[in-house]
Structures are given as C-alpha cells and as structure tokens.
Amino acid sequence: MHPLDISLILLSVALVYAQPSPEVQKRISAAVAAAANESNPDYTAFVNPFIGTDNFGDVCPGASVPFGMVKFSTDLTGYAPAGYVTDPTQTIRGLSPLHDSGTGSSLGTYGNFEIMPMTCPGGFNTCATMLSDRETFRKNNTDDASPGYFSQTLDNEIKMEATSTRRAGLERFTFPKGSKPYFVLDLSNDLPDSFVGGTMNIDPQQGRITIGGRWGSSFGPGSFSYQAFSCYDLLNNGNQTLDEYGIWEANAFGLNAKGLGQAHLNLTQSLIGDHYEYGALFSYAGTPEEIIIRVGISFVSTDQACANAESEVGTSSFDDIMAQSKILWNEKLSSIQIDLANTAPNVTELLYSSLYRASLTPNNATGETQGAFSGTSSFYFDSLYCSWDTFRTFYPLMALQHPVDYAQIVDNYIDGWRKLGWMPECRANNLPGWTQGGSSGDVIVGHFAINYHNEATALGIDLDELYSALLADGDLNPMEWDIQGREVNLYTQYGYVPTDAIDPSSTGRQTREGSRTLEYAFEDFSIRQVALLLNNTADEERYLNRSLWYRNVWDKTVVSDGFNGFMQKRFPNGTFNFTDPTDCSPQDADENRECSLQGDNVEGFYESSSWEYSWFAPHDTNGLINLMGGNSTFVKRLDHFFDAGYYLAGNEPSFQTPIGYHYANQPAKSIQRVRQVVFENFDITPAGLPGNDDQAAMASVLVFHLLGLYPVPGTSQFLILSPFTPTYTIHNTYLNTSTTVTTLGFDPKSLNATIPDGAAAYVKNVTLNGVELSTKCHFDFYDVFKVGGEMVIEVTNDIDQGNDCGSAVPESVSMGGFASLR
C-alpha cells in the first residue's frame, strides 16, 4: 500500500447499490500509482466520473468534452435528474445525448432522443417500443466511464458506448454473436415527460433519421417550452446496411402500433390529456456484432444538427473522437499539477474528479440559440443551474485557471441583460429558471471585473456594459421576479425584504424574505465593488450602505440554545415575525416542513435554517461578530453550530462558515473544521458527495479545501488554510503565469477528520517569493496568482502558534475593508 493511502472513508462497507465496474477503481488506482514516476501524466486517468452518482449527487457520468452541449449517458427510471443512477433496482430507458450534471430537478432534465438497442427474435412487429415495455436492467458492475467516454451493458449482453464532441458524438453498440440488431429511437419521451409536439423523418436511402420538437422546462414555469433537434446517421460511412424501418405509436391502454415502411411523424401534445409515445424502429441487415451511429444535436434546426455531426465528427472513428476528447480534458485538468508521488491516492482522485466536474457544466451552446437569444453574436451557455449555487466557489475556481472560459460566460450573463433586461439567475433547458436568492449573477460578473479588469477588453468584456447590467439588477424591479431580477421596490423602501407586504407593480412568490435580504445585501456588495473599480463615488456609497442591510433582519431578542440574536423575517412596520431558528435545520423534528421554493415555506429562509443563514455576510463577517457579542461568543456559537448538527456541508450558504474562525483570529480552528468537513462528507465512491453536486458547487468547494484556500467571492481575497498535498502548481495559460504552493513540513498524519495530537497542520508562517507575509490568514490574488512565483505555507503541530493571524484578520467591509482595489 502507498504510504500516504489514507482513505477518506472505509471502502469495505456493505454495498447497497450497484457499483460501476470494479475495473474503474482498479484502473484509476493503477494510474495514480504509476504517475509518481511519470513526467507527463495523463490527468484524465485520475478522474472517477461516478463520484456523485448516488446519494442524490445527481452527477452525469456521460461522455462529454469540457462544457460540452451534449453529454451521452443512459437514462434510468426512478429519481434520476442526470439520467444515470447506480441503483440496481432501476431499469434503463435508453441512451440519450442531452443531460445536465449536478442539478436537483426532481423529474430530471433533458433525456431527449433516447435510443434503445434490442434483438426482437420474433421480428419487427414483436419489438418492445413503449417505454415501460422496453426498459431493461443493466448487467451489474459493468458500468464504465472516463472523461469523454461512457459505457453500460444491458442484462441481455448488449453493450452501449458513447463518445462526444461539443454538439455531436458517436454511439457504439455491441450485440451478442448471431443477433440481428434492432433499435427503438424515441421522439416524445424525455426525463420530465414534458413533450409538447414534434416531427420525425426517416430517410432510408441516406440512412438518416431527423427529429425536432418542443419540450418543457425542468426548473421553471410550466408554460415555457424549448426546441431541440437531432440527426441520427445510421450507416457508419457506408459500412452498415439498413434493413427494416418504420414508426411506432403506443400508450398505456393497449395501443401498440407499428408502421413498417412509414417514414414520417408530425404530432402535437394530446389536448385531452392522454399520454402517447412515438418514435422510429429500424434494424440492420445480417447479424453484425458492432453498430456505430453518428449523432448531431442542435437547438436551432435538424439541418444544423446534421451539420454539427458532419463538421465535428465527420468520418472520424470512435477511438479518434475519444482521443480528441482526452486531449481537451488534459488541457483543463493539467492547469493544476500536484506532487503525485507524495499525495494520498484518494486525495489525487478526489481533486482531479472534482476539477473534471468543475469543467463539465454549464453547457456551451454558442451558435445554438433560440427565443430572445436567436442569432446573438455573444457566447451562449445553457444550464446555468443556478447562480445562487455557483457564485461562491465555482466561478472563483474558474478565475484561478481559465479566465477565457470565465469571460465567455460573463459575456453570456451580460447578453441576458441585453436581451431580457436583467441578467439570468438560473437558466434551465434554454429557458429562465426559478430565482433562489436574488440576482446572484451580480457576484459572478462582479468577481470577474475585480480580478480581470485589466484584461477585460482583451477578453471581450466591456466593463461599462457590465456595470449597466449590474445596475439593472440592483435598481430595476421586474414585473415578475420569480425568474429574473429582484424584489427591489420593497427592498429599497424598507431596507429589507418585508413579509406580508404589497408591491402593486410586480409579482413573485412571497417567501424566503430573510434569506433574500441577506443575498440581496451581498449582491449589493458586489455592485459596490465594481462602482469602486469604476470610480463611481455616488453608487459606491449607495451600494456600500445597502450591503449592510443584512443587519436589518437581525433580531437580537431571539434566543436559541442559549445564544442571542438570529436572522428573522420582518413586517413592514418593523416588527419581527418569529420562526424557530432550528426550523429547516438537520435537527428539525418536523420532517414534512417545506423549506425550499414551495408557497407554504413560511420560515423565511431558502433551503436553510436561521441558524445556518445567520452566518451569511461573506463581505462583513466581523460585522456579524459584533452583532453576536464579540470574538469569544462568536467562536463558542460557531463551535455549537457544528457540534449541535446544524451545519450542512451540502448547502451553499454554509460554504464559508467553517473558515469563520479566521475572522475571530483563531485560524487553527478553521483548519480543524475543514479537515472534519472533508473527511466526514466527501469520498471516492458513487455516494461520495453530501448531496446534489449543484453544478459542481460541491466539486469546487472541495478543490479549494484540498488546496488549502478559500475565495471570498466578489473580491480578490483568498483565505489561507492547510493544503492536503505537499506541493501544487496552478497554471494560468492566459496570464502566462505559474504559481507553486509548497507546504513546508507537510504531515500526512494530519489528514484525518480529527487532526491527531502532534500532527503538523497549523499555519506557522507564509512567505511569497521569499518574503514573509505579515498575516498568515489571507492574501490577494494580485500578489500571488496574477504574477506567479512561489508561496510557502509552513505548518506546525503547535496549535497555539498556528492559532493567530498575525497582523490582520481577513477584511470586512464595516471595518474599513475592501476600501481599495488593485
């Protein structure tokens, strides 16, 4: 065993769910071991795409390129938002090219154009076409995946494989020897069962099936629908011969019709409410063991779907497309290089698997626009699930490594303002999705401006235009703020989002008043930062004041577990509307309480308790300390928050909370908490995430924990922790900089949920290019990653020596922090 093979959990537990093929983990472990002696390792070999495919992680392990519009994976029955799940009691519906990863839509998202291979011993008319009839169990422990590749074998021994480009891919099917291959291709079914209408055409001479239709949103208003198109080329460059072909129609009440030789479907949704299913059925001449089908996808037209397949795949082989995908993934993953010889194998696998998921979404659909964005000249990304999830760590991680990708996504946000009047908060299926906390895109574009304002023009971003988009979010109340913008009118009238109040000019769900106030205030801070950057003194002062309105929902009279003061809802007359701070926490005795977007969520907070959200003021933690009664009380209260079980590792408002001790000048306790958070909540199994990956929010926060850093979003400040690897280098190819972070005195014994006595984990001092920093709790992006060089974090086993920040704790805006920018 590798001397640093410190498991993040015991892997010899009884397995409740089907696991991927055991060969997946063997292959990864062998690659990590071999890489210790390699100068140019294959970083894709360290990635486990199945992490997060159980325990409601909702990760898609399908074949994709970085930010690919397509992600080829199987769709299974039951709760499977990403299509795939490990649960062996669920059956396979088919293989499809469109999926999202790490989203929590209960009905699933996409899953259009499912194809299902079969043998049909009785011939064409005996094939199982309807979804419930064709569903098939997998052959357990055969699922396989790596970056750019996915495979699953059915219990009838038919193997399905896929590889992809940005908008196209190849599907490869291997049949038992002597079998005649049949395929069902579905027009109507998708994961959320949202078909509105569509067409299908079979061209037997060309060997091509084209599909186009409309489907409904998976996380937005049911009245919205989107269009999608596909192009299936069946002949593999003339190496396969089509035999029978036709269409089918079925329902649950006995309809099971097949039309041999018929080639067209043109259908709408049943207005009377009956559920009909439609599609194509075709077979191949002879008994070929291998069938390859080329697939193109578009959100514009079937012609463009076919053109995408022709331009991106053409006549390339399956292995060629796989190899091209691997090159793209290695370019992304190699931006962070660690000491492979002296890093625990599980840490290596966790890190690169997380970096992989952090470049999996959002989906780059540039050139594939529809609706208000049709024909835009800007970059366009689908699946912005949701800005509330991703502003905290996902985009700050992108800022470290990939500013070009970041700029393209920022352009996409600004273009939302150009086309709709406000930046998107959540985009699902090319449609506006539900707002969760407000206009969190403000933090995303603001973070870019603060960290890349000198490069913005070269990266295609106009800062004045970016600022106009921010002001629209901050000052203009949309008529409907459930899908974009904020409830600005009442917020600015009262200094908080009031409960039980009327705005006669706008509509939205009157819930989450406490958490929306807190999120609005932080979004205001991000606008203030850009105003400061652009020397807009009036706006800077106005938004600085608004950023402190989080204090307006602090009720000092509320007591819980002996601690005074909690965030609460508030009426227009200024009185507070009490809710128990433990409601909606993991300790809530009412398992049926609604705590999300439901209309009967009366608690005032989104997916959180007041205990959890009362820590949320990332820009002004020292202001919270003062509200709570000073450092000593703050630390005791923070200890209690964790020890009493109120903390939720899988909930974004708590991401920065474990590092809150820094602000009370006890950074050693932050390091202890982060070790605990990682080892108790993350591992390398399919159940290795603490819930929904939330479009790689979990992946990105884990990356920062493993690197011993934490970003303060909307700023250029990083908090310093204790890395899980002795050395790593971050490459920023756009800036042409490389920054190496070395942990002097790195002690593998410290890698435990509870740091053992005598293990070196606590920061003794920090030097940058040989110069010791005056504080060992934080540094600025401009001093380190913007210029490159070497940072050395010296660690000690002396807790007292490591439990002091030095000259200054991290900045807080009410204490004069963030008063100047670089």
Image: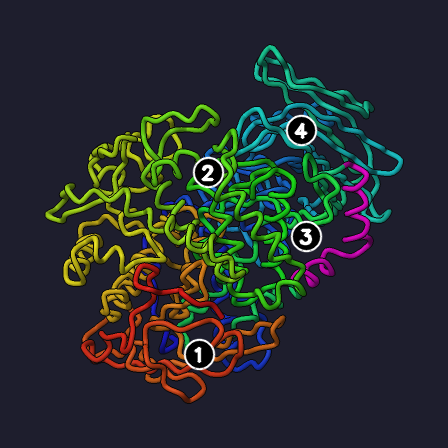
Q: Residues within 10 Å of mark 2 (few under 14, many from 20)?
A: many
Of marks 1 and 2, the one in the foreground: 2
Give the Cα separation between the discs numbered 3 and 1.
Answer: 35 Å
The residue tagged 3 is 164
User: In the displayed image of the protein, which residue is found farthest to the bottom?
Assistant: 770
Q: Quadrant of residue 734?
A: bottom right
Of marks 2 and 3, the one in the foreground: 2
Pointer 3 and pointer 1: residues touching (CB < 8 Å)?
A: no
Give the Cα separation between the discs numbered 4 and 3.
Answer: 23 Å
Image coloring type: rainbow
Residue segment shown in magenta: 301-325
Instruction: Residue 161: give x, y in percent of width and height.
Output: 64, 49
Instruction: Residue 751: give x, y in percent of width and height.
Output: 31, 71
The residue tagged 1 is 741
Name the amino acid, label 4: Arg
Which mark is on residue 214? 4
Q: Element type at marker 1?
A: strand
Q: Earlier in the sequence, mark 2 or mark 4?
A: 4
Front-lying residue, 649 or 436: 436
User: In the displayed image of the protein, which residue is found farthest to the top?
Assistant: 272
Front-lying residue, 413 or 402: 413
Q: Is residue 82 visible?
A: no
The residue tagged 2 is 486
Q: Relative to 400, say whether 57 is above or below.
A: above
